[in-house]
Image (cartoon, grey):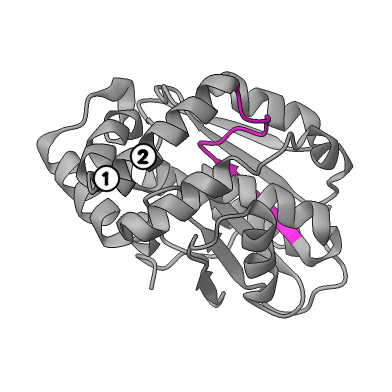
Amino acid sequence: MPNEDTAGPLPLVLVPGMLCDANLWRDVGFPEGHEVHHVPLWRADIGALAEDVLAAVPGPFVLVGLSLGAIVGFEALRRAPGRIAGLCVMATNAGAPRPEQYVAWRAMDELITAGRFGDVVEQTLPDMFPDRCPTPEAARRYRAMAHAVGATAARAQLAAQATRTDAADVLRTARCPTVVLAGARDTLCPPAFHRAIADSVPGAVLTLLPGAGHLLPWQQPEAVTAALRELVAATTGTTPASATSAAP
């Protein structure tokens, strides 16, 4: 239901995934009149990253997170449920890390420590795209963004991944309007992960995006735009506002 304690356009706080930055949202049109704040992932602990999210703006806000960014959002919701007036999560997993993930993250960290960050970028690249098959241009774009994020931030993100916990308990207590977006061809975080999230959050809306992989804002920007407009409208009890052409 709409948050009756908010007045005026709510700010949007955007949290990207691992090896992603503000460029992730470049093709998304955000609702007109709403401030957009980007929170980088530079800390090695999910709790510390959640505090960065909560410090991004005063008062209530709409939280938008992809992959690791959504995981950080779950922790922010745990710590300050009254601050989050709306929640949009996509391409993510609310479960605790699996044993094989710890192994993979340690191996990636060892590669980065050995000066082979480029190898880590190449390892992660296929999982970002539908059926693990990027076009040459899509691969180029991802490499550019990942290298802009850099090795130091990547090591912090790997360490943060290992500190996350199962979020099912906090999701069951969520009372804000919630949208869950899943790529039908996401091999890293498949639709089943998102069904579990939507089933946990009372009243959550799950949307499956055909043809999309992991980087939904690149692969289905119009659908992400529409979802955010609907979510913002749900937080205020209004009809969806028009969207700008792209993120600032």
Q: Residue 36: which numbered mark, if any? A: none
Q: What amino acid type should be assigned to the residue bearing mark 2? A: Glu
Q: How crowded is mark 1: few (under 14 residues within 10 Å), some or many (20 or more)?
A: few
Residue 101 visible (yes or no): yes
State the mark number for residue 110. Answer: 2
Q: What stretch is highlighted in magenta?
A: 85-98
Q: Mark 1 points at which residue?
A: 114
Amino acid type shown at disc 1 = Ala
Classed neighbour count for the residue bearing mark 2: other residues with Cα under 10 Å, few (<14), some (14–19), many (≥20): some
The residue under the point 18% across, 40% down is 139
Q: What element carries label 2?
A: helix
User: Which residue is depicted at the point 35% across and 65% down?
Assistant: 245
Residue 228 against residue 193 in the figure, above or below:
below
Q: Which residue extends farthest left?
A: 136
Total marks placed? 2
Q: Position of residue 62 (x, y in %)?
A: 66, 62
Q: In which quarter of the image is residue 170?
A: top right
The answer to whether residue 204 is left or right of residue 229 is right
Dividing the picture into quarters, in which one does residue 132 lie?
top left
Picture coordinates of residue 92 (x, y %)?
A: 55, 36
Residue at horizontal 22 percent and vertical 24 percent from the top = 133
CB atoms at circles 1 and 2 under 8 Å apart?
yes
